[in-house]
Amino acid sequence: MKKISHWVYNLLVDQGLSESWAGTINMLVLSIMVLIVLFVLDFFLRKMIIGIFTRLSRSSKTHFDDLLVKNKAPRNIAHIIPLVLAYKAIPAIFRDFPNTELFFIKTIEIFGIVLFLWIVRSLLHTVKDFLKTLPSLKDKPIDSYIQVFMIFAWAMGLFYAFSIISGVELWKFLTALGTASAVIILIFKDTILGFVASIQVSINDMVRIGDWITFEKYGADGDVIEINLATVKVQNFDKTITTIPTYALISDSFKNWRGMSDSGGRRIKRALIIKQESIKFLTKENIESLKKIELIREYLTHRSSAIDSFNSENKVDKSLLINGKNLTNVGVFRKYIDTYINSHSGINKEMTIMVRHLEPSPQGLPIELYAFSKDKRWANYEYIMADIFDHLLAAIPYFELEGFELPSGTTFKAVPQSFQKGKATQESR
């Protein structure tokens, strides 16, 4: 081996060149030759190993080998043999330059650590992508666990590299590092919090990838697209991305809409506000007129008959409508809403359906509809709700009721001219 590594040196010395120059030129020539050999070897090994993995991935039924190729694991593995050969060749190349030999040996060792970490990263990313294809793990925060392993691997690689550079044994280096543990904890505080939060989120099944969450503190309202060690990414409905610290999921309050998605319907909870001055008792003529509405015809027939029987049996004085039992236009309208909702094809009849009065306000009497749509998709849900309230808003006048709205410019324009003239006369007096 010594003869092979010194053949240029011997040739130059025989030609009368000084030993120092002959050694330097010998080193340069050998370095160039080894680099060329390593480059060619690395090129062919990469082509061969990647080709073998590609053929295997095409012929196999599993997707794991496809993911290995995708994450460049074969490419990184191909670098191992050239790196080992370079490590073995360094003593022969720099035999006459011990300091340079030591420098390059340490350089190769450090590069070996980096190559090892690249291979580990490729394998971990492959495992991550493979686990995400499994239905049972698709919505789990796999990224967080992979990042923890990578942080640990990079930390150990970094410590080992420092040990090589400084010449201090690894265990002594780690012992000295223990004294700086408080500083390390402070530096990696967010990482540690994120890791603990990821475990709690996973164990308690608080958030999954694909869940719709609302986090008002961070302005997030959309679908979770990624959960990793430090952050949770939410794609809002306007297609913007909001990034939330992972530990915020356990330290702050947020709303997860998964319960609604997993249920049989999406809630509709909206009120119509009725002007209270339009509410009144119904006369027989009013009832006969309302019987033309098919949805409540049967109800009005039976209900008005029962009320008439009660009033007759109790000899109620009906010269005033307030006496005895009576139907009101708002009560009949409430029954109409209930019947209409129960017959609507977009409403889930197996879930709560309720039409109720809310507390009267200065604006009027709110009549709230509480039900659940069958279709939970946002656009379809909004369409169903709009369809229902389009109809109900148009139905209000049929019951001689009025909906409340704040006055607009057209309201004041509609004031009679006689009223305006009378007011002007009073002001002139």
Image: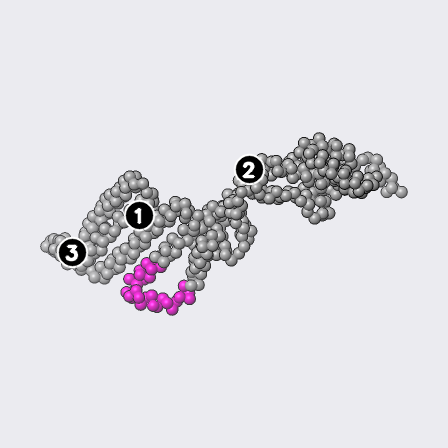
Quarter holding the C terminus is top right
Mark-to-mark CA distance, 2 and 3:
84 Å
Q: Which residue is mark 2?
A: 380
Q: Position of residue 423 (x, y in %)?
A: 84, 40
Image quadrant in which you'd find residue 105: bottom left
* Residue 251 higher or lower than 327, as above or below: below
Q: SS at mark 2?
A: helix
Which is more toward the observer, 5 or 83? 83
Callout 2 crowding tier (Cα within 10 Å): few <14, some 14–19, many ≥20: some
Judge whether 401 appears above or below 12 on screen. above
Q: Which mark is residue 22?
A: 3
Circle 1: residue type? Ala
Could you tell me if residue 17 is visible in this image? no
Above/below status of 325 relative to 201: above
Q: CA distance from mark 2 to mark 1?
A: 45 Å
Looking at this view, name the residue that lies furthest to the top. 292
Start and end of the magenta stretch? 155-184
